[in-house]
Amino acid sequence: MNHLQQQLRKKEEHEANLMQDQFSEKEQELENCRDELSEKEQELENCRGQLSEKEQELENCRGQLSEKEQELDYCLGQLSEKEEQLKFLQEHVIEKEEHENQLMRQLTQTEENKVNLQTESAATKQELTACKEQLWEKEEQLRKTEKQNDNLNRQLREREAQAENLQAQLNEQELQLTNLQKEKAFLEEKVRAKLQEVTNLEKQLRDQEQDKAELHTALSTANETLRKYESQLKQRDWVISPDEIQITENCLGAGGWGRVVEGRYCDCAVAVKHLHKSTLTPKERSLFEREMDIASRCRHPCLLQFIGATQDASPMFITELMEASLRTLLGHRKLSEIEISVISLDVARALNYLHQRKPIPIVHRDVSSANVLLWRQRDQWRGKVSDYGTAKFVQEIMTVAPGALIYSAPETGSPYNQTVKVSQFY
């Protein structure tokens, strides 16, 4: 009996030891799980911190882009003011030259009148000199002959009376000459005024004829541009046969229209965009063809080069193959200040080219980091804008919330805040 009790106690002690060991192992496993949970929480905090840094970098990029646009508007305003000042100065210089010409003509006429007066005065002096010579002769005869004194004195008085008459006549002639010169100057001033009026009228007529010719030329140019534009719209030389495209399994990404894979066309690596739907409705096909027409008319180093597209039941969009996208690069690391400046400038150049398109500007309306593709120029990333699927001509009415919502302004979510773009684009 005691032996059985001892065995029972030993068995209980053994079971208790086993349970104690198992309990210790469970506690150790629980401690390990707690350590792993702490590590995971730390990793989650690090990821949240990185996400906050990326969002801050994106806000900085937006601020810099806004500052660049403000600087561009300011420079354009200053240029317009300088052109207006230059035009005003040119008109002022022309008026000064006309005034100087009038003064020169008046000065020439005054000099001519002065010469005439000097000539007439010289003739009068000669007459007076002749009269004085005669008077001296008479005095000499008076001194020689006292007998003829009375006669000579009488003759002298007569000569003096004649001289006075001549002097009076000379003064009267000078007064008449002065009046005639005044009348002549008045008539010449009236003639100059009439000639100036005729010149102004002729200038206005020439300006009107020149404006008419310029308007006619501008109208002809606009009609020619419109005909070329309509001809380009009718011609769709971007159509490519599906047999000429080789598709690979390398998926480059996916978007609102579909997914993009790597392919080959004419022995060159290209990016091929597949639509999600196998068959398009007439409206969707019209939108797709509109995107192709827009892309085929765009040529710029900062725009993704469009190669062509197919027109079968499941259309494909073929472009040049880029190395990465801005969204992918931002997911791996932070951009340097030089990279931010270079890529932002490339995007701004591309959008400026679209906005300055003739005869009708183009608005992209879906600019995002996923639609900015990158390529390497030596050791520097350069950017190209892609995806014209939501591009809209300026004269069309804006729709609600175009493009990606996170990149759109708050007012785009309401149709009551939209404006119609029908006139001059900035």
Image (spheres, rainbow, N blue to C red):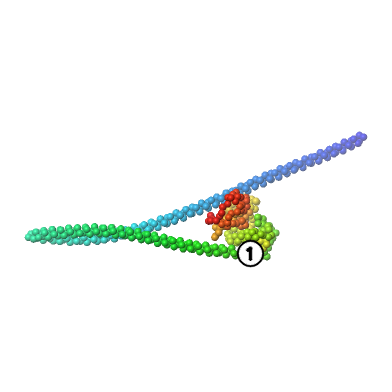
Q: Is residue 336 left or right of residue 149?
A: right
Q: Residue 129, how many percent across, how many down?
A: 18, 60
Q: Residue 408, how many percent across, how many down?
A: 60, 51
Q: In this orientation, does residue 315 appear?
A: yes
Q: Residue 185, how many percent across, how many down?
A: 30, 58
The residue at the far right in this view is 1
Q: In this orientation, does residue 136 appear?
A: no
Residue appearing at x 48%, y 63% in the figure: 216
The residue at the far front in this view is 416
Residue appearing at x 24%, y 61% in the figure: 119
The residue carrying mark 1 is 239
Residue appearing at x 59%, y 64% in the figure: 234
Q: Is residue 56 left or right of residue 211?
A: right
Q: Amino acid at mark 1?
A: Val
Q: Residue 124, how many percent across, how many down?
A: 21, 60
Say which element carries label 1.
Answer: loop
Q: Quadrant of residue 7?
A: top right
Residue appearing at x 53%, y 51% in the figure: 71
Of the pair 14 and 290, the residue shown nearer to us: 290
Q: Quadrant of residue 202?
A: bottom left
